[in-house]
Image (cartoon, rainbow, N blue to C red):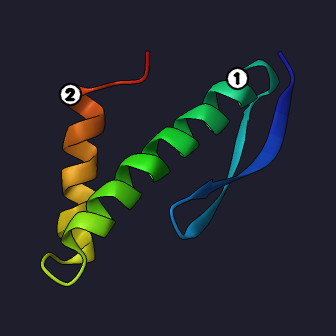
Amino acid sequence: MKKIETTLHLYDEELELTIKEEEQERYIAAAEYVTQKYNAYAQAYQGKKSDHTIALMTLLDVALNPMD
C-alpha cells in the first residue's frame, strides 16, 4: 500500500495530506462535495451567520447526507 502526498482544495483552503494512493479519487470527490455544500450555505447565509456557523451547518448536512 503506497502512500502519497496530495493537496485538496476545501472551500477557500488548501489542505495537504498523506493518503493511500488508491483512496486519492475518494478524497478528491469528498473535498468537492464538502466545498459544494459549504458554498451553498455560504451563499444563502453570508452576512447573516458567521463562517463558523456556516461550517457547522455544512458538517451536519454532510453527516446526514453522506456521498453516495
- Element marked by disc 1: helix
Q: Residue furthest left?
A: 48
Q: In the figure, residue 3 lies in which quadrant?
A: top right
Where's the N terminus, which quadrant? Answer: top right
Labelled pair 2, 1 in contact (Cβ < 8 Å): no
Q: In the figure, residue 56 lies in which quadrant?
A: bottom left
| Residue 64: assigned label | 2
Where's the C terminus, which quadrant? Answer: top left
Q: Name the one closer to the observer, 65 or 21.
A: 65
| Disc 2 from disc 1: Cα separation | 22 Å
| Residue 68: assigned label | none
Residue 40 image offset from top left, x and y in percent: 33, 56
Instruction: Name the residue located 78 percent from the left edge and 18 percent from the top edge.
Output: 22
Tag 2: amino acid: Leu
> Which numbered disc, 2 or 1, marks the residue closer to the eye?
2
Instruction: Name the residue located 27 percent from the left edge and 26 percent from the top edge.
Output: 65
Image height check: is 62 above or below 26?
A: below
Residue 38 image offset from top left, x and y in percent: 36, 56
- Element marked by disc 2: helix
Tag 1: amino acid: Glu
Ranked by sequence position, the earlier of labels 2 and 1 is 1
Instruction: Name the residue located 19 percent from the left edge and 78 percent from the top edge.
Output: 50
| Residue 23: assigned label | 1
Q: Name the one closer to the observer, 20 or 66.
A: 66
53 on left or right of 3: left
